[in-house]
């Protein structure tokens, strides 16, 4: 592969002339002499065989070629800075990638807010998210396929922090036949209608999410599918209240008036799978998640 003709310093000088509005101002901003800045830009033009500036009146203006090269030069300098920041973080032991296993009942909006907050501070760290259910979360933790996990139970031998308590409500669309009964409901009423259930994502797939009791059942893999099916009136389900808050607020879903047991509670835990050996990125993301969960539960 041929070496580049133009150095980063020459591209930086070119961009600085444009941003500062002249050679003298660029020289001052870069703490260089004006003659060195002028030479760098002239050398760039000579090596590439192009003109990046043209004189219009008493001012130098970018040529069409100069405008294109300016955009590319900015991108090149930005990428160089990102590489340098990544190198510094890696030298400090910062992970290049973080893997998470998160139970699907954890509020998606809250998770994405946390990931966004982390990414804005550490954009060089890649994130791989596994949205898991029950056994799938257990396996990811036990096999240490992830750096941290949000789980509904703690596998033996792992330290954990309580993260949040979730309220589950039994809900269906307002036009569902159960709501049309117009009275409080018993378990026998539920038994006669279709229940929507999330499938265990573990390799054995021997557990289902939800309080089972209906003779009719649709078992689905995705949380979004179960919510959509319920909104369409295709069944009822036990939902973590936070995951369907928009549907409840808009009236697309409505809690069923059960005579007893109309709400259930579960707790989620935060687990660093490598425990004391966890890297700074995993520890930082864990702190962001704990802070956000506390604020949401306040």
Image (cartoon, rainbow, N blue to C red):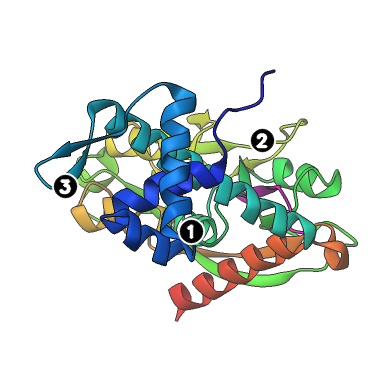
Per the image, label 3 sits on a secondary structure element best described as: strand
Residue 266 shows up from this direction? yes
* Quadrant in which the N terminus is drawn: top right
Q: Is residue 6 left or right of residue 181?
A: right
Q: CA distance from mark 2 to mark 3?
A: 66 Å
Picture coordinates of residue 119, whole percent (x, y): 52, 55
Asked if residue 1 is positioned above or below residue 68 in the image, the reply reads above
Q: Earlier in the sequence, mark 2 or mark 1?
A: 1
The residue positioned 75% from the left and 47% from the top of the image is: 146
Mark 1 sits on what residue? 120
Mark 3 sits on what residue? 59
The nearer-to-camera label among 2 and 1 is 1
Please check the rendered image and state whether residue 101 is part of the magenta-colored stretch, yes or no: yes
The nearer-to-camera label among 1 and 3 is 3
Q: Earlier in the sequence, mark 2 or mark 3?
A: 3
Q: Is residue 284 left or right of residue 49?
A: right
Mark 2 sits on what residue? 201
Q: Earlier in the sequence, mark 1 or mark 3?
A: 3
Range of residues picked out in magenta: 93-102
């Amino acid at each position: 592969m041929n070496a580049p003709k133009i150095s980063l310093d020459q591209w930086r000088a070119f961009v600085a002339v444009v941003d500062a509005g002249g050679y003298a101002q660029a020289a001052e901003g870069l703490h260089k002499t004006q003659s060195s800045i002028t030479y760098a830009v002239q050398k760039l033009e000579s090596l590439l065989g192009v003109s990046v500036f043209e004189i219009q009146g008493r001012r130098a203006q970018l040529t069409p070629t100069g405008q294109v090269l300016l955009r590319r030069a900015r991108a090149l300098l930005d990428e160089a800075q990102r590489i340098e920041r990544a190198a510094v973080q890696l030298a400090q032991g910062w992970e290049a990638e973080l893997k998470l296993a998160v139970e699907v009942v954890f509020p998606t909006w809250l998770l994405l807010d946390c990931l966004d907050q982390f990414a804005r501070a550490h954009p060089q760290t890649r994130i791989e998210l596994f949205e898991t259910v029950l056994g799938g979360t257990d396996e990811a933790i036990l096999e240490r396929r992830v750096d941290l996990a949000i789980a509904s139970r703690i596998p033996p031998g792992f330290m954990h922090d309580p993260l949040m308590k979730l309220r589950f409500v039994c809900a269906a669309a307002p036009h569902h036949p159960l709501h049309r009964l117009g009275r409080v409901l018993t378990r026998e009423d539920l038994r006669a209608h279709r229940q929507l259930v999330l499938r265990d994502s573990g390799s054995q797939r021997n557990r289902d999410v939800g309080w089972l009791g209906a003779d009719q059942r649709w078992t689905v893999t995705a949380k979004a599918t179960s919510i959509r099916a319920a909104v369409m009136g295709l069944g009822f389900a036990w939902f973590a209240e936070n995951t369907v808050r928009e549907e409840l607020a808009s009236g697309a879903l409505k809690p069923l008036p059960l005579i007893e047991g109309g709400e259930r509670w579960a707790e989620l835990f935060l687990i660093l799978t490598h425990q004391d050996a966890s890297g700074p990125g995993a520890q930082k993301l864990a702190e962001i998640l704990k802070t956000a969960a506390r604020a949401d539960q306040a």
